[in-house]
Image: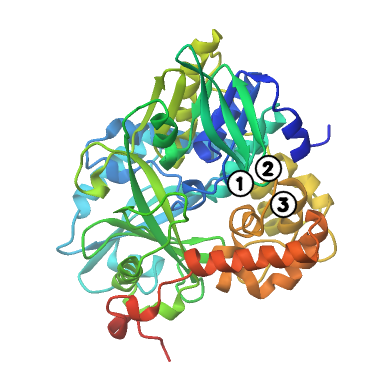
């Protein structure tokens, strides 16, 4: 069966749906996947692009939340660890094991014994033993350039990482293979009520302005940081506290790390990470109340740039990393349930699910626990639909199908991106499309495949979410724009005017939201952010 086009999906909107999911991040994708797996007539709509919000701008870690142990959140950690193990077992090509090193410095919290106790509990929850302690010499071998002052040794342990946007797309791929439909650039405008209960929703095509009224037996609000907007239409009080997390990317040669360095920030004791990802080194994250407009992409502040650079230079002082070494930045807004905690970093990461007049809202939570969030939402939906939920342990992912005749690195890459479609993608590769894009971990094939098969509507969909070139290459990858054009313009069917408009739109987006604030606005730039000779 051929994949559905956007026109096919629009034509299907008039039917009555068992379930309409609003929100195309990981939470919504998980709900659509679980509903489609059960044979429900399920539709997902997203006002921007799939994974446009938090789900493409996270720290990329699929972890159990080691830091939540010291806060007494054992249940959250246990569920997260078990979901991490499940995801790694189902899709090891997508959820990759990542080694971590935490330096043990004299006089710094949490200290060796407390941290090792946490790791012992962490590993027991996962049914494994992955941690050990090494002396200062071995620590410096594992992490060359690690600060030597007061270094006594280091804890080594294992967790996992992923490409968060690709995780969303893989889950949506599975959902649509089972009959679910996902439409990006389709905005929810107004809930429809019947007898005081939600019976559907009015939506608007963001590209054409056309409106559609959807009939739905159940509507699931999985809009993350935007969840209070739909709830507000029912007169419900806000429940979320939007928190911004910002990140920096560096060339791998400038900040070379073979494994993740985990640390407590020297200024406030918050956890930060420095780790290899998609051919660059990623540094994150901050944790601040976000007062900006949610419909505008979040951007890093000058203070956050200084904060993250201070973390790198604290752990790897010999590198003398500065402002001009940074490739790109990105910032996302986390949908954290407001529990009245003053400190943003202490706010709970548990998810909530509630049925309010037939609107089922699922929000909060973590990237790792998206399946559990989806199942909690479907339990409420099943009651409204008068259907049994059935098996809750079915696989999220189909087995990956390995392409033949490729080198191991290219094989691993295609399995990571496409899973069961990897072999098909390999067969469609044109001349030179299995070559690597310099400065990244991407193949040229990924661009044309996405343009043909992955609902690309705008250039930023392609360069920021289908691939991650926008945050791993300088200037958002615009230095490669002519080669990109050759590959994707015919597949997208854009004429000259449309292409030039898309490039201008993308350039503006990169300058405003993925680049850095001016150097002179960054605190302390003369001292440790000065450019290197």
User: What residue is pinned by disc 2?
Assistant: 419
Q: CA distance from mark 1 to mark 3?
A: 19 Å
> Marks 1 and 3: which is nearer the front?
3
Location of residue 232 (image quadrant) = top left
Mark nearer the N terminus (3 vs 2): 2
- Identify the image quadrant of the C terminus: bottom left
Q: CA distance from mark 3 to mark 2?
A: 14 Å
Mark nearer the N terminus (2 vs 1): 1
Outermost left residue: 107
Residue at x 47% of width, y 34% of height: 370
Which structural element holds mark 1? loop
> Marks 3 and 2: which is nearer the front?
3
Can the viewer see residue 224?
yes
User: What residue is pinned by disc 3?
Assistant: 450
Seen from the viewer's position, the closer of residues 11 and 354 is 11
Q: Residues within 10 Å of mark 3 (few under 14, many from 20)?
A: many
Left or right for 436, reference 346: right
Left or right for 265, reference 101: left
Can the viewer see residue 403?
no
Left or right for 244, reference 62: left
User: What residue is pinned by disc 1?
Assistant: 93
Which structural element holds mark 2? helix
């Amino acid at each position: 069966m051929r994949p559905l086009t956007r026109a096919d999906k629009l034509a299907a909107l008039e039917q009555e749906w068992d379930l309409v999911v609003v929100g195309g991040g990981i939470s919504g994708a998980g709900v659509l996947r679980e509903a489609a797996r059960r044979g429900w007539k399920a539709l997902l709509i997203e006002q921007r692009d799939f994974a446009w919000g938090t789900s493409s701008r996270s720290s990329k870690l699929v972890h159990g939340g080691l830091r939540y142990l010291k806060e007494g959140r054992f249940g959250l950690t246990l569920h997260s660890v078990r979901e991490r193990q499940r995801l790694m077992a189902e899709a090891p090509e997508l959820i990759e094991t990542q080694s971590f090193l935490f330096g043990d410095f004299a006089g710094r919290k949490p200290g060796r014994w407390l941290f090792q106790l946490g790791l012992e509990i962490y590993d027991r929850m996962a049914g494994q033993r992955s941690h050990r302690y090494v002396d200062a010499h071995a620590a410096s071998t594992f992490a060359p350039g690690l600060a030597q002052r007061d270094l006594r040794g280091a804890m080594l342990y294992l967790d996992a990482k992923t490409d968060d946007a690709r995780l969303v797309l893989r889950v949506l791929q599975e959902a649509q293979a089972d009959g679910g439909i996902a439409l990006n650039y389709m905005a929810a405008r107004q809930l429809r009520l019947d007898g005081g209960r939600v019976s559907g929703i009015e939506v608007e095509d963001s590209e054409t302005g056309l409106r559609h009224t959807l009939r739905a037996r159940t509507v699931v609000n999985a809009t993350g940081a935007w969840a209070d907007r739909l709830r507000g239409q029912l007169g419900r009080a806000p429940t979320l506290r939007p928190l911004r997390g910002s990140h920096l990317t560096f060339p791998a040669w400038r900040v070379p790390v073979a494994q993740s360095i985990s640390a407590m920030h020297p200024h406030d004791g918050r956890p930060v990470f420095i780790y290899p990802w998609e051919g660059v080194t990623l540094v994150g994250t901050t944790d601040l109340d976000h007062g900006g407009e949610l419909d505008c992409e979040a951007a890093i502040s000058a203070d956050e740039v200084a904060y993250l650079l201070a973390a790198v230079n604290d752990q790897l002082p010999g590198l003398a990393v500065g402002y001009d070494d940074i490739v790109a930045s990105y910032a996302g807004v986390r949908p954290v349930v407001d529990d009245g905690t003053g400190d943003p970093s202490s706010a709970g990461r548990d998810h909530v699910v509630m049925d309010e007049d037939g609107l089922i809202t699922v929000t909060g939570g973590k990237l790792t626990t998206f399946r559990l969030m989806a199942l909690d939402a479907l339990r409420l939906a099943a009651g409204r639909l008068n259907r049994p939920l059935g098996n809750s342990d079915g696989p999220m992912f189909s087995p990956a199908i390995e392409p033949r005749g490729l080198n191991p690195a290219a094989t691993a890459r295609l399995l990571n991106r496409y899973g069961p479609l990897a072999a098909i993608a390999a067969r469609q590769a044109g001349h030179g499309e299995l070559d690597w894009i310099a400065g990244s971990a991407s193949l040229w094939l990924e661009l044309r495949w996405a343009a043909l098969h992955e609902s690309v509507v705008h250039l930023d969909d392609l360069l920021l979410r289908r691939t991650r070139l926008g945050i791993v290459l300088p200037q958002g990858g615009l230095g490669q724009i002519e080669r990109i054009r050759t590959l994707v313009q015919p597949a997208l069917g854009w004429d000259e005017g449309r292409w030039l408009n898309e490039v201008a739109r993308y350039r503006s987006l990169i300058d405003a939201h993925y680049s850095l604030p001016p150097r002179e606005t960054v605190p302390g730039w003369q001292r440790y952010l000065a450019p290197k000779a």
